Image (cartoon, rainbow, N blue to C red):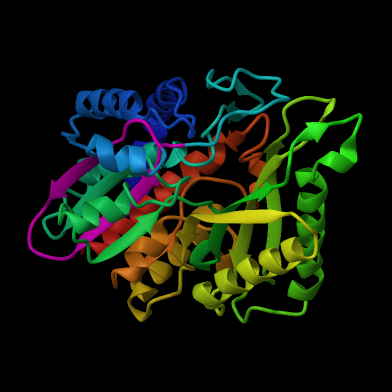
């Protein structure tokens, strides 16, 4: 048997243990918001330690966590030092959006049915806590590497932008990898992704009794006028195309609307939150300035309406760095061998905290356990699920790729 065959065999022999580890992670909620994620980090560190993977806990100061809109965060680092050579980071995030409605399974149950594991973060991205931990365990058991280092980074701020996750670890010089792989799906290696601008718009009118509506200024009607102006942009965005395969065009979504005080009251205040996805070729400052102008111009067309605009998040696009080619080569080579089909290198319309590493000059790619599309995984929807065979095979790909990269 080759070393690759032995890595595969070790992962097969320990796969039930790997699945149980993922189930234990799913069963500790990490809904963000509210973002009380330190308890999950404590549980993950306990489970990793029991497998012989000593884990550093790095609590983020409360004032920084609260400024980011979260409650608690403890980032985890597992360092494996084999000898001289480059350091490869493996980064997965444990924070997730709340489950929402429509589940037929317990969102925190980790139930298994028809070869799938169900639960919030089963596919994005507690699964890759499991992928990376068991790939490293297989590598050490079979290959006993003598060169290079691996750092597993388990962070809790991807949903809110990564500033108190990977960015905080980099800023405080707790990590300085040469290459990095971040949580992703199994059938593509991702080299670029969209940026994201999120803003909160508060529309002010004048509250009044519904029986005498002319005595007030309807903030909701003002908000509708602004929303129509914003949504009209989506037709224009379709004329802008990215040169990155896998990424199409920019788009805008309004995900939350809130306001009013009662049914019989003219609403005096309405707020909404928008999400603007930016292709890698766009300038984020120009995108934000344009949106602000559209909003203020639309508000000015409604007498008595005023607006406040607040930026919530600005996540730059991930652009490929030339040094990522060894990662692409290793993952594509072993992905094709394990999955029996080519693994293309593409961009994705998602945004992730991987951009923080590329902004720091650290070449990286996105690859891990998951289906061909976000839609198949039910990520951010009810009944999120992961094919267990995708988990098994992605773990083999990462273990094999690490063997090559640390040679």
How many callouts does the rendering have?
Answer: 0
In the rendered view, tell whether residue 334 sits above or below residue 246.
above
- The reply to whether residue 8 is visible in this rendering is no
Residue 87 sits inside the magenta stretch: yes
Q: Nearer the viewer, residue 101 or 292?
A: 292
**Which range is magenta?**
70-95
Residue 200 sits inside the magenta stretch: no
In the rendered view, tell whether residue 282 sits above or below residue 342.
below
> Farthest left residue?
83
Q: Nearer the viewer, residue 346 or 339?
A: 346
Q: Position of residue 226 (x, y in %)?
A: 76, 58
Q: Residue at x 89, y 42 (%)?
A: 214
Q: Position of residue 241 (x, y in %)?
A: 69, 79
- The reply to whether residue 180 is visible in this rendering is yes
Q: Nearer the viewer, residue 153 or 285?
A: 285
Which quadrant would the C terminus be assigned to in this image? bottom left
In the rendered view, tell whether residue 178 sits above or below residue 281.
above
In the rendered view, tell whether residue 284 sits above or below residue 100.
below
**Lateral position of residue 291 relative to residue 227, left or right:** left
Q: Position of residue 184 (x, y in %)?
A: 49, 52
Q: Residue at x 85, y 25 (%)?
A: 264
Q: Image quadrant of residue 35? A: top left
Q: Residue at x 32, y 60 (%)?
A: 180
**Lateral position of residue 214 relative to residue 84, left or right:** right
Q: Residue at x 54, y 34 (%)?
A: 388
């Amino acid at each position: 048997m080759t070393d690759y065959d032995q890595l595969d065999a070790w992962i097969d022999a320990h796969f039930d243990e790997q699945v149980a580890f993922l189930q234990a992670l799913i069963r500790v909620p990490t809904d963000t918001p509210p973002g009380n994620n330190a308890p999950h980090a404590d549980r993950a560190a306990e489970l990793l330690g029991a497998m012989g993977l000593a884990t550093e806990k790095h609590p983020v100061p409360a004032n920084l966590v609260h400024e980011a809109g979260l409650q608690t965060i403890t980032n985890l680092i597992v360092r494996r030092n084999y000898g001289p050579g480059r350091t490869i980071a493996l980064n997965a995030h444990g924070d997730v959006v709340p489950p929402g409605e429509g589940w037929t399974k317990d969102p925190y149950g980790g139930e298994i049915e028809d070869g799938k594991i169900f639960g919030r973060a089963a596919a994005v991205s507690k699964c890759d806590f499991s992928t990376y931990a068991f790939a490293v365990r297989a590598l050490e058991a079979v290959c006993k590497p003598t060169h290079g280092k691996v750092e597993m980074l388990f962070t809790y701020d991807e949903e809110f932008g990564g500033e108190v996750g990977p960015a905080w670890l980099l800023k405080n010089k707790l990590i300085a990898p040469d290459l990095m792989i971040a949580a992703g799906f199994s059938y593509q290696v991702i080299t670029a992704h969209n940026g994201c601008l999120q803003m909160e718009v508060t529309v002010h009118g004048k509250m009044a009794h519904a029986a005498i509506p002319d005595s007030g200024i309807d903030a909701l009607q003002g908000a509708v006028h602004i929303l129509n102006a914003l949504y009209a942009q989506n037709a224009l965005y379709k004329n802008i195309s990215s040169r990155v395969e896998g990424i199409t065009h920019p788009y805008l979504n309004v995900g939350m609307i809130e306001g009013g005080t009662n049914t019989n009251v003219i609403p005096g205040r309405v707020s909404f939150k928008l999400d603007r996805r930016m292709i890698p070729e766009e300038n984020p400052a120009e995108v934000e300035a344009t949106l602000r102008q559209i909003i203020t111009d639309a508000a000015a067309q409604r007498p008595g309406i005023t607006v406040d605009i607040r930026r919530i998040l600005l996540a730059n696009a991930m652009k490929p760095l030339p040094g990522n080619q060894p990662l692409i080569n290793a993952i594509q080579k072993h992905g094709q061998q394990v999955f029996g089909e080519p693994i293309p290198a593409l961009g994705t319309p998602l945004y992730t905290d991987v951009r923080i590493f590329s902004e720091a000059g650290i070449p990286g790619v996105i690859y891990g356990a998951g289906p061909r599309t976000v839609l198949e995984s039910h990520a951010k929807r009810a009944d999120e699920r992961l094919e267990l065979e995708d988990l098994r095979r992605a773990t083999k790909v990462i273990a094999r790729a690490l063997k090559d990269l640390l040679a």
